[in-house]
Image (cartoon, rainbow, N blue to C red):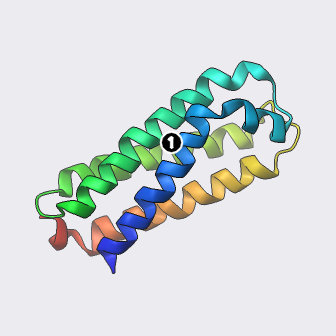
Amino acid sequence: MIKLSLLVLSIFSLIYGVYFLFFPFNFVNITAAEETNIAWLRNIGASITGLLFIGLLYIYINPEKSLKLLTIITITSIIQTSALIYSRLFNEFSAKKIFLIDLTIYSALIVTIYLIFITIKYKKIFN
């Protein structure tokens, strides 16, 4: 079950990451944000695709001796989610339609909490 959840998170990260990486203008349009956000949207898309998709897929394929990689992914997720929350609290987003920003934050928070949970509770699987 844990292994399957990593595959699901990996695929979710691929979809999410590719969306920001290749279609940032679409996100800007539906959130009514300023187009100056394109660079950071592509950057976060690349990060999500590279680290979460490829990293979690690697762990899914070869969970043994992957605890260090899972820990790095978890810490990165904590930092990214914290930065999103901080930016939201201090109105750093240019988006006029903030619902999708909030949805992104909630999704990131759920993934982060889950990664923390499996990293701590199921660490033996990844040793």
Please name the amino acid that badge 1 sits on: Gln
User: What residue appears at the point 29 percent right and 68 percent down from the top-left corner?
Assistant: 120
Q: Position of residue 59 (x, y in %)?
A: 24, 58
Q: Position of residue 25 (x, y in %)?
A: 73, 30
Given residues 25 and 64, the one toward you in this image is: 25
User: What residue appears at the point 55 percent right and 33 percent down from the top-left corner?
Assistant: 21
Regarding mark 1 in the picture, which secondary structure is present there?
helix
127 horizontally vs 90: left or right: left
Given residues 82 and 118, the one toward you in this image is: 118
The crowding category of the residue bearing disc 1, from other C-alpha atoms within 10 Å (few below 14, some 14 to 19, many at least 20), is some
User: What residue appears at the point 44 percent right and 36 percent down from the top-left corner?
Assistant: 47
Q: Which part of the image, by quadrant, shows the N terminus?
A: bottom left
Q: Is 68 situated above or below 125?
A: above
Q: Is residue 75 visible?
A: no
Q: Position of residue 84 (x, y in %)?
A: 62, 42
58 horizontally vs 98: left or right: left
User: What residue appears at the point 49 percent right and 61 percent down from the top-left corner?
Assistant: 111
| Outermost residue to the front | 22
104 horizontally vs 17: left or right: right
Q: Is 106 situated above or below 45?
A: below
Residue at image mark 1: 80
Q: Position of residue 57 (x, y in %)?
A: 31, 55
Q: Which part of the image, by quadrant, shows the C terminus?
A: bottom left
Q: Is residue 66 visible?
A: yes
Instruction: Report which quarter residue 56 is drawn in.
Output: bottom left
Total labels drawn: 1
